[in-house]
Amino acid sequence: MNPLIQQLRRYGHLNEAAEKEIEQRINYFSKRKGEHFLKEGQHVSSYFVLSKGLIRAYFFKNGRELNSWFGEENQIFGSILPVYTEKPSFENIQFLEDSEVYAIAVDDLNELYRKYPELNLIGRKIAEEVCIVLEERIISLHTESAIERYQSLIKLQPNLLNRVNLGHIASYLGITQETLSRIRR
Amino acid sequence: MNPLIQQLRRYGHLNEAAEKEIEQRINYFSKRKGEHFLKEGQHVSSYFVLSKGLIRAYFFKNGRELNSWFGEENQIFGSILPVYTEKPSFENIQFLEDSEVYAIAVDDLNELYRKYPELNLIGRKIAEEVCIVLEERIISLHTESAIERYQSLIKLQPNLLNRVNLGHIASYLGITQETLSRIRR
DNA sequence: TGCATTTTTTGATCTATATCAAAATCGTTC
DNA sequence: GAACGATTTTGATATAGATCAAAAAATGCA
């Protein structure tokens, strides 16, 4: 089954007609490591799932790249601003490995919400789950030291360490690579 | 009109039957400064609006209180974990001024979602808006210095400074009161 | 008005993390 | 397997912010 449909089903019931039309509107992409899926300033965006691969979201601050999150297989992602509002994205989404992506564009999504209002239940559940993840990150940044944040990340995304280099992790944690290297020792 | 209904209407259309039933389930509370609305460990919780007053959400870390957010008039609030999941709250919600509150309990809310599925649109929009607010806070904590975070807060909630003491603000910003005092100079 | 309590500021010192530079290690390719 | 670039570690020093203590200022209240 389509991996994006599969994920949607985790949040609530999908009736047959809606499922069929969603499936028709889902786009498949195969992307190489280093390619971008979204660049800052873009309005177009989508909810998407990786059936294979790894992505990072990052943005620029004072000329430096800062990672805001990493995405692994079989989870729904999207860039909050362009998916939930009319505003352009301030972040970039880039593949860190060769990846396969199933995506549904915001415009299609909004049309589906209109056509099949029962989809709002799934949309609500997804957004609520995103809130919970974001709140955990806030608590981590608000209350934890660099070491603790590193440990929290390991607990949450243990595979990440084998898949991306230290610089990326440090940037996500809000510390320098040197500090992260010392912490690990 | 009921202040909570008024806020709900900002997110989408409420049909008459749903609105009537929501209104019946909304509870009104009048609370004095210092009283609590929610304590950690509780499962029961609600979406609510202040028609008058001010609240803070806080939790304990290493025996110290840390403020996680402040709520002013005419905005929908809730504690994420107990409202969006079955999990108990880890935070406390306390009134910082004498306040008037209109609230709908999670259990009632969920029953209404079942009975009037079109409410899921409003629920989705609320959760999506919460995501945007949370993302801004993450960026602030991730990328800004204490001074910048202070300035961001002033921009977002300018009245707060006249309504709560420095200790509360410092705790929200994740710095000590002494540092905040020095920053302001 | 004056006293007690709370809040804010100031001072001295300490600590976690940043910065800049260089060395060491790892991985890849010819 | 030698050589190159990328990644990680180590070292020396600088800085933002924490901590602890105390003084000053503001606020509440009898």
Image: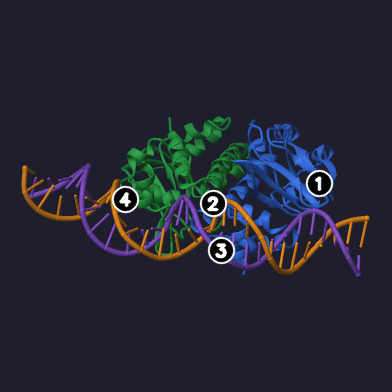
Chain colours: A green, B blue, C purple, D orange
Numbered disc 2: secondary structure: helix
Measure how far apart labels 3 and 4 are at the Cα level: 35 Å
Label 3: chain? B
Residue of label 1: B101
Q: In which quarter of the image is the N terminus of chain A?
A: top left
- Is residue B166 visible to the viewer in this orientation of the structure? yes
Mark 1 or 3 closer to N-term?
1
Residue A52: x and y, percent?
36, 37
- The x, y position of residue B132, in whole percent, is 58, 52
Front label number (3 vs 2) = 3
Do the dots labelled 3 and 4 sit on one chain? no
Q: Name the residue under label 3.
A: B147
The quarter of the image holding the C terminus of chain A is top left
| Front of the two marks 2 and 4 | 2
Q: What residue type is labelled 4?
A: Gly
| For residue B174, side relative to residue B48 (left or right) | left
**Gap between marks 4 and 1, in whole Å?**
51 Å
Name which residue type carries label 2: Ile
Residue type indicated by callout 3: Ile
Whether discs 1 and 2 lie on one chain: the answer is yes
Task: Give the label on residue B155, or none.
Answer: none
The image quadrant of residue C28 is top left
Q: Earlier in the sequence, mark 1 or mark 2?
A: 1
Q: Nearer the viewer, mark 4 or mark 1?
A: 1
Residue at image coords 52%, 55%? B139
Any mark on residue B138, and which? 2
Q: Is there a contact, CB below 8 Å, between mark 1 and mark 2?
A: no
